[in-house]
Image (cartoon, grey):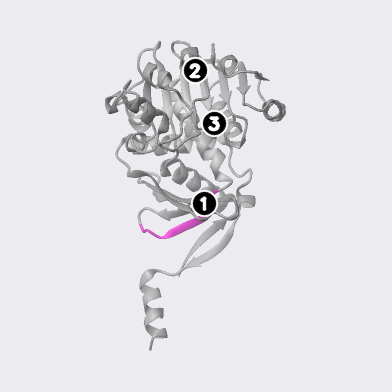
Amino acid sequence: MTEALFLSSADTAGLVEPAAFVDAVRSGYQQRGEGAPAEPRTKLSSTDPSGILTTYAAVLPQTGVMGGYTYDAGFAAGDAWFITPLFDAQTGEPLAVIDGAALNPFKTGAVGAVGTDILAQSDARVAGIIGSGPQARGQLRALMTVRDLDIVRVFSPTAEHRKEFVSNMNDEVDAPVTIIAVDTPREAVSGADIVVTATTAREPVFDGEDLDPGAHVTAMGQYDANARELDTTTIERATYVPDLRKRATQDAGSFLAAVDAGVVDANHIHAELGTVLTGDAPRPDKEEITVFDSGGTGIETVAGANLLYEAACETDVGTTIEFTPASTAFEYSNTSSQ
């Protein structure tokens, strides 16, 4: 038998600050840039009842852990459920099983901030956010750990939602920044140094012609070959950096739509995020528009899960569970069959 921790969403609430997630995820992608294994998601679809079952995984050798995500969405419950297993990368033994629902906005916000930090201008002060849900809030929390923003302009299609977002974030944020709701995507994007999209949209959420030279875009909301947040103009104008090169040609809908339109091809991919972080494919000219396209990988998941696991061990949080190694389980099986 070996012991591991089960961490519920209640266990992990407030356990780690956003800045720590950003640091952990940055390290994870640097390891990816040095060759750490990671694969895009595998998605299995069901039609009756309608739903998806998704998995992805990564190994972070320097951190010493591996694991990933398994989650489902839809089906009869009409909701989503996330399970995050974490293993020791040396022994293979399980370390933790984490309810990934609470982890999701933090690790996703962290990878957005890592991409923004390396690709956006160092003096960026104006941000535009498209979206007003939990992912958008997570993006802003993390973004403010890597840039000292003066103003954040928020748009989402429902006026009530964007106003609620502004009210909640103004109450939460302890920084001299002005957060305002705007009435159109153009008002959020035009003149912004940083644009973040965190939506469930299936069609482009702003016009790429509205981007200023040197602007950076972090797109977080889609990982479906048939859905996109960014239009072909944005992809064509930008230096394009995905989380994983293989994912860009598999389910990055914004990029694939631009390929289908004939405005770019696979050579338009500048580099993976990890390769930019290691300095092997540095950020281009200051006037270049940049795009970081993140659909989610095991890298940020494993990095974030390990951070929670270490914090839980230090604070004596969580429930101990036991796992039986396969060799012993086989012995039980042989005994029961006699």
- Which quarter of the rendered picture does the N terminus lie within? bottom left
Q: Position of residue 284 (x, y in %)?
A: 35, 17
Q: Main secondary structure of the magenta part?
A: strand
Q: Which residue is mark 1?
A: 50
Indicate which disc residue 198 carries: 3
- As measured in the structure, the alpha-carbon distance from the residue carrying label 3 to the one carrying label 2 is 16 Å
For the C terminus, the quadrant is bottom left
User: In the rendered image, is residue 106 in sight?
Assistant: yes
Dot 3 amino acid type:
Ala
Q: Secondary structure at mark 3?
A: loop
Residue 172's spot in the image, x, y percent? 69, 30
CA separation in Å, label 2 and label 1: 32 Å
State the residue in front, 37 or 17: 37
Residue 263's image quarter? top left
Q: State the residue at coordinates (43%, 35%).
A: 226
**Which residue is located at x 48 percent, y 52 percent?**
47
Q: Secondary structure at mark 1?
A: strand
The residue type indicated by label 2 comes to Asp
Residues shaded magenta: 91-100
Report if residue 31 lies within the magenta region. Answer: no
Disc marking residue 207: 2
Under circle 2, the secondary element is loop
Horizontal and vertical percent position of residue 335: 39, 85
Q: Is residue 93 magenta?
A: yes
Q: Are there few (<14), some (14-19), or many (20+) residues within 10 Å of tag 3?
A: many
Label 3 with label 2: CB-CB less than 8 Å:
no
50 up-or-down from 22: above or below:
below
Badge 3 or badge 1: first in the primary sequence: 1
Q: Tag 2 or tag 3, which sits nearer the N-term? A: 3
